[in-house]
Image (tube, coloured by chain):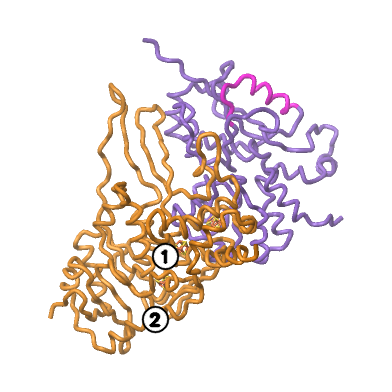
Chain colours: A purple, B orange
Amino acid sequence: MAQPKKPKLAVWKFSSCDGCQLSLLDCEMELLAISEAVDIAYFLEATRRVKKGPYDISLVEGSITTAHDAERIKEVRRLSGTLITIGACATAGGIQALRNFKDVKGFIDRVYAHPEFIDTLSTSTAIADHVPVDFELRGCPINKAQLLELINATLNGRKPNVPRHAECVECKTQGTTCVVVAKGEPCLGPVVQAGCGNLCPQHGRGCYGCFGPMESPNTAALAARFAALGLDRRDIERQFRSYNANAPAFREESEAHDQPSRS
Amino acid sequence: MAPNIGSKVILDRSGLDRLIADLRGRGYRVIGPVLADSAVIYDEIQSAADLPAGCRDDSEAGTYRLDQTGEPWLFGYTLGVQGWKRHLYPPRQRLFRAERGERGFRLLDDQEVEAPLALLGVRACELAAIQVLDGVFDHEGFTEPGYLRRRQNAFIVAVECGHAAATCFCASADTGPAVGQGYDLRLNEIAGQGNWLFVAEAGSEKGLAVLAELPSRPASPDQIAAAAAQPQQAASQQSRQLKDDAARVLAVSTESPYWDKVAERCLTCGNCTMVCPTCFCTSVEDVTDLAGDIAERWRRWDSCFTLDYSYIHGGNVRSKAASRYRQWITHKLATWHHQFGRSGCVGCGRCIAWCPVGIDITAEVRALADAERGR
Ligand code: SF4
Ligand code: SF4
Ligand code: SF4
Ligand code: SF4
């Protein structure tokens, strides 16, 4: 009996730092198991050898920041069965979405000797803002265990165990003492999706929000608590304006604390 | 003279060390209070040297602070961050493991054998919480074997409170601070001449067998009186109260506009349910290996504040924060009576202290009652 054909996997890069693709390479031993289970057909970060599409599973890293990218992602969508976006760039626009709050043309004029060579959009946006996406895996970078679980679930045709509840659940599951309550330190955890493995609170530091908004984020209530802890408007704005600045819930909250223009 | 059940004897500090060593010698994993970073938690201990000497905590809504008093009290704190639920009903439990065979899946019988637990430092409210969970996990013919096994094998050393935190309200919940029944040993840590002593009493045959092995002497009337004064002192320090008619207030408040007010503050983070020593809700997850040859089923703590928890076919039945908070407090204080014949709240105050925005179950019941009266 012939072996059933292995599903073809492609890994794509848009505007990003490659950190999420590195998480995949970082899987090491498990990567061997993955390469047994799938045919890694397109993964430039790992090999220059590529196979033609279509692809059964596409992992997409990075955000859309150029007109060229906005066209290319449509082609990727066309070639892909299941399209999974990985990381804060692909799911929310990433840290580079800070540009969305500023005048990009002004930056270009100041930074580049020949601004005329720079061709970029004025925004950095999530892949799902451009094409339909089957699953968004959060994180800056993504968590290796969640990536493996997602690939595993996709191959086995089951629901991935990637909860959308708050990071606080990870604290309590691991037995980490809450930094807000025990130290009076700000922490984004109550409005951030779990999944990082409790990295920061476990080390006594508030959550930075790498995994973006949780399922029902009450950012206004948390911002009020931050104010009571002594954070001023600008601090609060900055809390919500980082790796997931353009995720709608965080975007709205940071804008609510935007300083009046200081120019 | 060997002690009897109910007779009060004195153990000195070395007697406490002997107790821990003796329990370990009998094969128990001894869990007790330890200092971890900025808080007292319950974790495995080897000897009395691991106990949080001199630590005193205080809590307010959304705040917990631990002080080092310099005094050598070992049980001067009130409560660990999380209760004994963590040990009797762990956050993640593997239910089974199975392997794909010729015909379907074959169950693998490879659960680890767990050592029995000795719980050292169980407060009155916590003993009540364990009794609440007993009612949940052995209910109308439905049993939870893992919990019941750990529970039946456990050895409980209760330590009575001499001091209450500002968030404690066991006196009004009628669960403490005096430790009633259900312990194997009960201790009171009292000041002696230049040192600290324990007034000890066995509450079961199992407890008596352990106590009889320890070096002890009969307690004096003064020492017995000092121990008896402790829970009275702790009760007199409590200012929070749960309204007597909380169950009625909730029963008539299902459509109260006040729920939207709570929802403005509630983060739906689930912290209250995770730290509550009686909240028992879980979700079940199936995992596989990459090839799909090994499957495991895991149970993990979940919360009525997560959306997945109330997702049923076709959608979520409690999408608004208002309905999730209402579900939690109504179950805890009202419908728990119908289901299990008592309140689900033992008055430990953990949900008040560990809520990042300080939502206070006692204050919310009062506010609901006021809103009801005003309508
Ligand atoms: S430390 Fe942060 S994430 Fe953890 S429980 Fe507290 S608020 Fe939630
Ligand atoms: S509801 Fe709050 S006070 Fe009552 S038992 Fe649970 S955590 Fe303790
Ligand atoms: S609620 Fe009562 S029994 Fe529990 S810690 Fe406070 S004083 Fe002690
Ligand atoms: S009541 Fe507090 S701890 Fe509970 S879900 Fe709401 S904000 Fe979180």
Residue B232's disc number: 2
Q: Nearer the viewer, residue B281 or A241?
A: B281
| Residue A61 percent coordinates (x, y) | 61, 33
Can residue B278 be seen in this snapshot?
yes
User: Can you tell me which quadrant of the image ligand 3 is in?
Assistant: bottom left
Q: Nearer the viewer, residue B258 or A67?
A: B258
Q: Is residue B351 left or right of residue B202?
A: right
Q: Main secondary structure of the magenta part?
A: helix
Position above or below: B309 against B163: above
Looking at the rendering, in which quadrant would you find the N terminus of chain B? Answer: bottom left
Residue visible at 68% across and 63% down in the picture: A227
Residue B346's disc number: 1
| Residue B224 percent coordinates (x, y) | 28, 84
| Residue B140 percent coordinates (x, y) | 31, 49
Name the amino acid, label 2: Gln
Position above or below: B156 against B235: above
* Secondary structure beneath label 2: helix
Query: Which of the marked residues, 2 or 1, is nearer the chain's N terminus?
Result: 2
Residue visible at 71% across and 51% down in the picture: A253
Residue visible at 48% across and 69% down in the picture: B244
The magenta segment is A68-84
Q: Is residue B15 magenta?
A: no
